[in-house]
Amino acid sequence: MARRPGSTSRGGPRADRSGRLDPGVVTAPRRPKPAPEAALLPPTDSSLVRMGEFGRAQGLNGEVRLKSYTADPASIATYGPLLGADGRLIELTSVRPATGDILVARVKGVTDRTGAEALNRLALFLARERLGEVAEEDEFFAADLVGLDVVDAGGTLIGTVAEVPNYGGGDLLEIRPAGGGATALLPFTKAFVPSLDIANGRIVIDPPDDLFAPAGPKPPDEPD
């Protein structure tokens, strides 16, 4: 779940809400409803929420890196079987932190590097109904932000939301510029993101002038 500093609301991936968020909103993990018998659903079904995506294999014994989109990255393993984009049911038997929202996971039935490599870039989904009802008006699913238009206060299109990463210092919006080129990261705070309008598919930001400026030269004393 994406979060903005100072809130007391709770949730898993953020619930689908529109409008402005309170300046003090920050969310924390909330345990999901008990999982019923998992049913296969088409990955393009609008009732599905993207929960994470596998990366490269880790080691030789079946472990695989996993990017989690939940507020507490490790809570992705508490939802029971997840639906892979290819239609498979995926059961996470264990996860451990790597860095930020990246985990190292074990998957039921995967015991070697070859099996782990076959999971690379496989997205994981959960039926939205399994997440339960939201407790706060301003909760929303982080997955609902991905793909939204990003505009400034005057309505000029700036780009689209590519991801909502967290590298340990708070949630960020990764924005893909409308004109193409490298993405840029913007802190997901009230100061930079004053308004959300998820129902109409857009986010209003107050961007710094150098949002898409290339990174400057590395300081000579900074280690490689």
Image: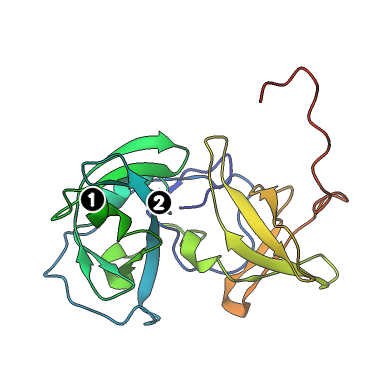
The answer to whether residue 140 is visible is no
As displayed, is residue 90 above or below residue 57? below
Location of residue 108 by image quarter = bottom left
Q: Element under label 2?
A: strand
For image coordinates 36% across by 64% down, the residue present is: 122
How many residues crowd around disc 1 within 10 Å: few (fewer than 14), some, or many (20 or more)?
A: some
Q: Position of residue 91 (x, y in %)?
A: 19, 57
User: Mark 2 or mark 1, which has the lower sequence index?
Assistant: 2
Q: Position of residue 48 (x, y in %)?
A: 35, 74
Determine the image quadrant of residue 83.
bottom left
Towards the viewer: 39 or 119: 119
Q: Indicate whether 107 appears above or below 217.
A: below
Q: Which residue is mark 2?
A: 68
Residue 64, given in percent of the width and then of the height, sits at 31, 48
Residue highlighted by disc 1: 78
Give the tally of numbered discs: 2
Q: Residues within 10 Å of mark 2 (few under 14, many from 20)?
A: many
Kind of residue indicated by mark 1: Thr
| Residue 59, picture quadrant | top left
Q: Amino acid at mark 2?
A: Ser
Q: Nearer the viewer, residue 121 or 157?
A: 121
Position of 100 compared to 96: left or right?
right
Tell us which disc is closer to us: 2 or 1.
2
Mark 2 to mark 1 CA distance (whole Å):
12 Å
Q: By what rule are the colours in the image chosen?
A: rainbow
* Residue furthest out toward the right: 209
Taking the image as shown, residue 123 lies to the left or right of residue 116, namely right
Residue in view at x 56 percent, y 46 percent = 171
Write the residue at 80% across / 51% down. 211
Quadrant of the snapshot with the C terminus = top right
In the rendered structure, the answer to whether residue 200 lies left or right of residue 217 reads: left
Q: Is residue 109 visible?
A: yes
